[in-house]
Image (spheres, rainbow, N blue to C red):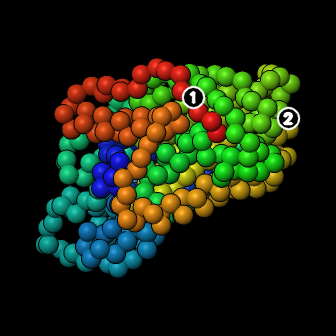
């Protein structure tokens, strides 16, 4: 598989940022898929997003100010509402009638749920992109709750390598050699995978002793887990132990062709686990940092645009990801229903 086949998936929802990062009356400047985006939260709590460039002289709107109702450019005071509509051009005088709608800036569709903000990134070359049937993910059982812990880390790579690296089942003995996760010993694994909406799911199963160290303290039963993946880069791992649950939502959002943001969020039912947040945050940063470090090394070889030799069965999930991505892009371009290319099967590997 050649790096020349890389493309960013459009007409789909991406994770933008945790809700707590933008307060009422404030704005946050971000970049998604190479596009500058300004997110604002009005005084009534609604989040909106617009292109972070003033159409007058191209100064970022984020360099101006937001009063909770309108964004004002710092250069000439042009003002825009949260929907991107131009509401005022102060330099105009009486008699200079101007259609302000000519100067509207692009707006983005936003969804907010469970303490997370999602942004819909349409195809910029299609003025009327088809609607996606994909909705933002909702973590069952935590509908009215925000995550108890959020950790964000930038990876210096194209989004595909972050996604396939995080779902890779065979790298743990070599990359994640830490006492609280697992040893360097190779274990033979066999897991049933099934197609699921816009992705695939590893069926619920008991964690092996080497993989369950971190979870055996959070409940009074044998830890069991189910892991699902869906486009564009959303991984949900739900682990139960007795009557307690821990859910990890990991999202992968492309910032540019060379930078990707990975957001790791945790939800749990345990009333006492909050006291261990500093320790959990440290462990998660260590875990993600190990993945980031190996991705940095991967970039040394990728700059020569090699053909990537994917194998069975440990690389099947990566192959499914590329197939899902191509099928979704083609179904959007052709205006037809998405056909999941994943077929249910048992995968076996040593890792």
Label 1: state its secondary structure.
strand
Q: Is residue 160 above or below residue 249?
A: below
Q: What percent of the width, then of the height, locates residue 104?
A: 25, 59
> What is the crowding at mark 2: few (fewer than 14 residues within 10 Å), some, or many (at least 20)?
few
Location of residue 52 by image quarter: bottom left
Q: Is residue 27 above or below residue 131?
A: below
> What is the crowding at mark 1: few (fewer than 14 residues within 10 Å), some, or many (at least 20)?
some
Mark 1 and 2 residues: CB-CB less than 8 Å, in contact? no
Label 2: state its secondary structure.
loop
Q: Nearer the viewer, residue 165 or 129?
A: 165
Q: What percent of the width, then of the height, locates residue 290?
A: 65, 57
**Which of pointers 1 and 2 indicates the residue nearer the eye?**
1
Image point 57% across, 50% down: which residue? 263
Q: What percent of the width, then of the height, locates residue 194?
A: 49, 21
Left/right placement of residue 189 relative to residue 338 reads right
Q: Identify the residue under disc 2.
A: 217
Q: What percent of the width, then of the height, locates residue 156?
A: 50, 63
Location of residue 64 by image quarter: bottom left
Image point 56% across, 46% down: which residue? 166
* Residue 348 - label: 1
Q: Nearer the viewer, residue 316 or 86?
A: 316
Left/right placement of residue 264 relative to residue 159 reads right
Left/right placement of residue 18 relative to residue 328 reads right
Image point 46% across, 20% down: which residue? 344
* Residue 195 - label: none
Q: Is residue 306 visible?
A: yes
Q: Nearer the viewer, residue 40 or 343?
A: 343
Q: Is residue 93 above or below residue 253?
A: below
Report, in whole angstroms, how far the alpha carbon at label 1 lies from the one at label 2.
Answer: 28 Å
Q: Earlier in the sequence, mark 1 or mark 2?
A: 2
Image point 45% across, 63% down: which residue? 301
């Amino acid at each position: 598989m050649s790096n020349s086949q890389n493309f960013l998936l459009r007409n789909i929802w991406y994770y933008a940022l945790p809700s707590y990062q933008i307060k009422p009356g404030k704005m946050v400047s971000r970049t998604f898929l190479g596009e500058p985006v300004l997110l604002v939260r009005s005084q009534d709590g609604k989040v909106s997003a617009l292109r972070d460039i003033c159409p007058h002289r191209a100064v970022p709107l984020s360099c101006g100010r937001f009063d909770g109702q309108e964004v004002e450019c710092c250069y000439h005071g042009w003002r825009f509402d949260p929907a991107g509509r131009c509401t005022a051009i102060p330099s105009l005088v009486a008699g200079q009638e101007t259609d302000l709608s000519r100067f509207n800036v692009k707006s983005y569709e936003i969804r907010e749920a469970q303490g997370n903000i999602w942004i819909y990134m349409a195809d910029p070359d299609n003025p009327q992109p088809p609607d996606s049937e994909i909705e933002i993910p909702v973590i069952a059982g935590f509908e009215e709750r925000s995550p108890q812990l959020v950790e964000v880390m930038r990876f210096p790579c194209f989004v595909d390598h972050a996604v396939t690296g995080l779902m890779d089942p065979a790298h743990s003995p070599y990359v994640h050699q830490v006492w609280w996760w697992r040893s360097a010993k190779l274990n033979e694994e066999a897991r049933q995978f099934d197609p699921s909406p816009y992705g695939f799911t590893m069926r619920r199963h008991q964690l092996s002793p080497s993989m369950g160290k971190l979870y055996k303290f959070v409940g009074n039963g044998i830890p069991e887990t189910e892991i699902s993946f869906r486009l564009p880069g959303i991984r949900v791992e739900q682990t139960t132990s007795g009557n307690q649950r821990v859910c990890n939502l990991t999202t992968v959002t492309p910032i540019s062709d060379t930078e990707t943001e990975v957001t790791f969020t945790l939800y749990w039912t345990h009333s006492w686990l909050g006291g261990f947040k500093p320790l959990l945050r440290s462990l998660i940063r260590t875990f993600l940092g190990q993945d980031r470090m190996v991705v940095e090394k991967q970039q040394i070889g990728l700059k020569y645009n090699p053909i990537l030799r994917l194998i069975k069965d440990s690389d099947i999930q990566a192959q499914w990801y590329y197939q899902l991505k191509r099928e979704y892009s083609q179904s959007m371009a052709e205006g037809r229903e998405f056909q999941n290319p994943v077929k249910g099967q048992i995968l076996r590997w040593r890792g």
